[in-house]
Amino acid sequence: MDNKTLENQRVLIVDDQRAFQLMFKGILYSMGATNVAFAPTGEQALAKCANINYDILFVDYHLGIGKNGKQLLEDLREKKLLAPHSIFMLVTGENTVPMVMSAVELEPDDYLVKPFSQSVLRSRIQRIQRKKTQLSAIYQALYDDEAQHVVELCQQELSTESRYQQFCRRVLVENLLALKRYAEAEQILQSSLSQRRNGWALLLQARLCFELQRFDESLLLCQEAIEDNRYFAEAFDIQAQNYLALGNLDAAFSSILAAAEIAPYSMNRQYLVLEIARQLDNLPQQVQASKQLYEITRRSIKQDIMHLLNYIRTVIDAAVRTTDPAQRNRYLQEVSLALQRVKRDEGMTREINFELFEALCQARLESLSGAQYQAKKTFAAVADQLPEQHQILPDAIFLLNQIGEFEQANTLTKLLPAELMKNPLLKTLFSEQQQFVDEKQQQFGELNKAGINSYKEGNFSAAIKHFEAALDLAPMNTGCALNLIQASIQQLNKQQKNKSRELFERCKKTFRIVDNMPLPEHHRIRYKELLQQFDKLRDEFRR
């Protein structure tokens, strides 16, 4: 047995358990290691790797608070801190399907389940070292993202009697697909499948058929791959994409949920869950997928405030759209809890004015609970800050549309940067709200117009009814509120004797919609004039 497997190798153990660090160090020393470093967190490991090029990394999957092992691997690859020759081994005491499959999908060099023997560890390391040494040029080209060079090197390796034929074929086909050289890729895949129905070949052929819109053929290949391996999450992914392309939403949803159950920690997978759930109007799954996206990206290189905002927006959107009062209350509670939890994470919230975002969310919740005046008042208190807060502008627009301030919503929409609308979920939320708003705005517009026509004809009582019906649809609409006030004042003036106290009180209540609110110039002038007229009526009622 070779006791010098790790001689002259720089080794990093990333584990938050001190006892395991020391035990593992002893095993590594017996294998010839003399240069062993430790990091208890993913963040510290990342910092060490920025300064030292380690040859072998043993990384625990969980790592307690902060980045987990999977996120650390993603970060190291994204930042090019994992050299082509380096060996990255994930280590865990858990062997649940979601844990194992999510880790395997990321393709670390190996995956060790505790406990493991020294002989198993040694043989695994030696096997990987031999492979990386022989295929060093291919690993370097993969590291450099040179797909064409990878193709050439794989072809060279396949022309020899290499022991790594299967690996080289798979890498060759993956890069041919990336280069859209489908005919060459299919020729290699057909040759491989004629010899043996390997899972990787079935999957890549299914992906190729999907890209070429041969959906039925792709579905058959996916089914074969799944029958061979019921935990083949990527095969379920492609199956879902095929069903979606064929318009079979229910089958697509069933497939993508199966994939997400097997390996939930994939962003692309959760985005597909979200997309199909939206098409099926499945609110709980939309919320779950957006929450999963936020959780996946927290602490990772993919961390972005966008995922947090999208999660909270999705829950509020679900609360707006659900018809079940109990479910709405659960969504409202989820939003409140999420906002409270995130406030403790300064690293996440420093990118935006989080207090402003929270205020707008609270206003939307107030509106949903029927507190329309309070919602508008909350908006009024923060309105001046909005033009500079591009990330949060969408939430102000959602709120304004929700309470019926369509004119102000349109004004703010013009300030939205085009870059922001590249966010696919935000774009979808806007599109869906706009469809709902367009329908409501049309009804509102017709009622408001009918009220204006009745007013012009001198039929103030009919005008009042139309304006009140319009406000039922858009309860905080400034223009319509002013119209109702004007019609009510005219009707009260018309009643020279026995003026209606009840109409006066309704008019007084309508003023609350516009009192102390930021108003456009034309509305502000009109408001002052109407307030003077109303004060005269108030004096009459006092006499």
Image: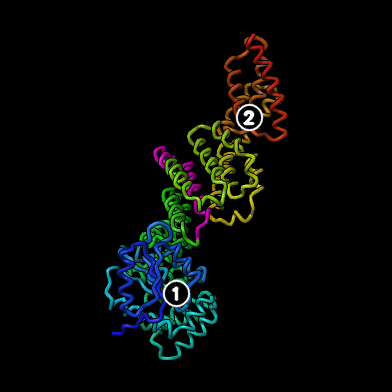
Identify which residue, 491 or 270, lies in the foreground: 270
Q: Residue at x 50, y 58 (%)?
A: 303
Please tell me which residue is depicted at 61% across the width and 49% down the height of the picture. 390
**Disc 2/disc 1 C-alpha distance (Å):** 63 Å
The part of the chain drawn in magenta is 302-330
Residue ID for mark 2: 516
Please report contact status of discs 2 and 1: CB closer than 8 Å, yes or no.
no
The correct choice, above or below, for 512 with respect to 199 in the image is above
User: Whole-percent x and y of residue 312?
Assistant: 48, 47
Q: Is residue 322 magenta?
A: yes
**Image point (31%, 76%), residue name:** 121
Residue 417 can be seen, yes or no: yes
Label 2: state its secondary structure.
loop
Amino acid residing under circle 1: Tyr
Q: Is residue 385 left or right of residue 202?
A: right
Which secondary structure class fits the magenta region best? helix
Q: Which residue is mark 1?
A: 54
Q: Quadrant of residue 9?
A: bottom left
Q: Which mark is nearer the camera, 2 or 1?
A: 1
**How far across and down, in percent of the image, does residue 200 sit?**
40, 75
Q: Residues within 10 Å of mark 1 (few under 14, many from 20)?
A: many
